[in-house]
Amino acid sequence: MTQSRSLTRLLAMGLIAGVAAVSATPASAQATLDTVKKRGKILCGVSPVSPGFSYADDKGARRGFDVDVCRAMSAAIFADPDKVEFVPLNTNVRFQAVQSGEVDVLSRQNTWSFSRDASLGLDFGPVVFYDGQGLMVSTKLNVKSASELADAAICLLPGTTTLQNLEDFFRPKNIKYESVVFENSDEWRNAFFSGRCDAITSDRSDLASVRAIANNPSEYVVLPETISKEPLAPTVRQNDPNWRDILSWTVYALIAAEEKGITQANVDEQLKSQDPEVQRMLGVNGDLGKMLGLDNKWGYNVIKALGNYSEVFERNLGPETRLGLSRGPNELWNKGGLLYSPPFR
C-alpha cells in the first residue's frame, strides 16, 4: 500500500512538472524576441570585411548579402530594416559571440556542419547560400589545378572547416602541403597578396570577395576544384524556437516571394492577389504573424524593405557586382537549383 501511494505521488509530481514545463515554454520561447523588442534593435554578428557579404560603404553603412539577412529580420520585427547594430566578428570568436549573447544572430558565411549543430549549443536557420571550398593562386604561379600544389604553403583562417577539408582532399592524393594559419582576415589576405603563401583557401564565394579587393584582380585565379560542400546558414542560440522560427521564416519569405513573383516594386499591387498563399504571406488573410509574435504584415514588411531573394542576391553578389557570381545551385528549385521554401499555410 505504501509503495502504491509513493508511486502515485511520484506520478502526480511528474505530471505537475510536465504541465509546468509546458506552461513555461511560451515564456522562454519569447526570450530573445522580447529582449530585442525592449532593446529596440537586433545585434547581428557579421564579417569585418567581406565584399558582397559584409562591408562598410563610403558612408560607413554596412552593406552586403549577410547584412541584408539581418535587415530582413529587422523589417519583420520592427517594420524597419535599419533597427540593427552590426558587430564585426573574426572567425575564431564568431560562435562564442552567439553563445554568450553578445549577438542575437550570426549572419557570417557560417557552414552548417554536424559537429557545429550537435556540440556548440547553436541552431542553424535555412541555408541562404550553397557554396564549396576552393583555392586561389596568383597567375604567376602558372598552376591550373589544385593537384599541382605539392609542397605549397596555403593560407587559411582558424575556427573554420577549411583545414579538415584540405586534409580530406589532399591525403588520398598523397600530396603534401604546408598550412599557414592567420588570426584574422586582414592578415590572411595580406599574407597571400604579399606572396607569403602560394595559395589561399576558403569558400569560393569568399575567394571571390578577396579577389575583388586585390589591386589587380586579373592577377589571381580561383582553381576549378570545389573540394567540399559548404551550406552557409545564419545561426542563433539553441532553446529559443520562436527566435529560430523568426529567422527561418524571414529567409523563407525572401525565397517564396521570388517563386511567387513578388518584388519590392510590385508588393503593394500583390496585396490584391487572389492567390491564398500570397494573401497569407503578406498578411492580407490569416494570422501567421501572430504565431511568431509579430504583426501579420511582417512578410509584406520584409519584401517591401529588401525585395525577394533574387533581388538580394543580384544587388550584392550577382553578375553586375564586383563579385560577378552566377546563381548556380542558389537558383529556385523549379529552375534547377536547391532553394525551396515550405508552404505558407
Image: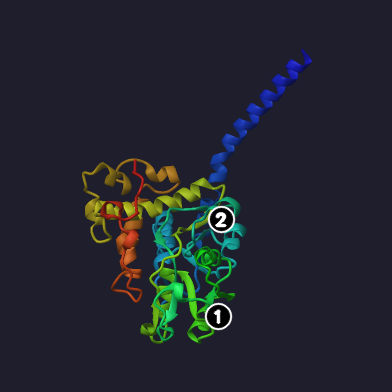
Verify CB contact (< 8 Å) between mark 1 and mark 2: no
Picture residue at 55% right of the left edge, 70% below the top: 90
> Is residue 60 something that shows in the picture?
no
Residue type pointed to by label 2: Arg
Judging from the image, what secondary structure is the residue with disc 2 in? helix
Horizontal side, residue 161 vs residue 7: left or right: left
For the residue carrying disc 1, how many other residues have a C-alpha within 10 Å: few (<14), some (14-19), or many (20+)? Answer: some
For the residue carrying disc 2, how many other residues have a C-alpha within 10 Å: few (<14), some (14-19), or many (20+)? Answer: some
Asked whether 184 or 155 is in front, the reply is: 155
> Is residue 52 something that shows in the picture?
yes
Please give the label number shown on residue 187: 1
Tell me where residue 254 sits by quadrant. bottom left
Q: Position of residue 140 (x, y in %)?
A: 42, 86
Q: Tell me the quarter of the image containing the N terminus.
A: top right
Tell me where residue 276 sits by quadrant. top left
Please give the label number shown on residue 300: none
Q: Position of residue 277 (x, y in %)?
A: 28, 44
Q: Position of residue 125 (x, y in %)?
A: 46, 53
Q: Position of residue 213 (x, y in %)?
A: 42, 81
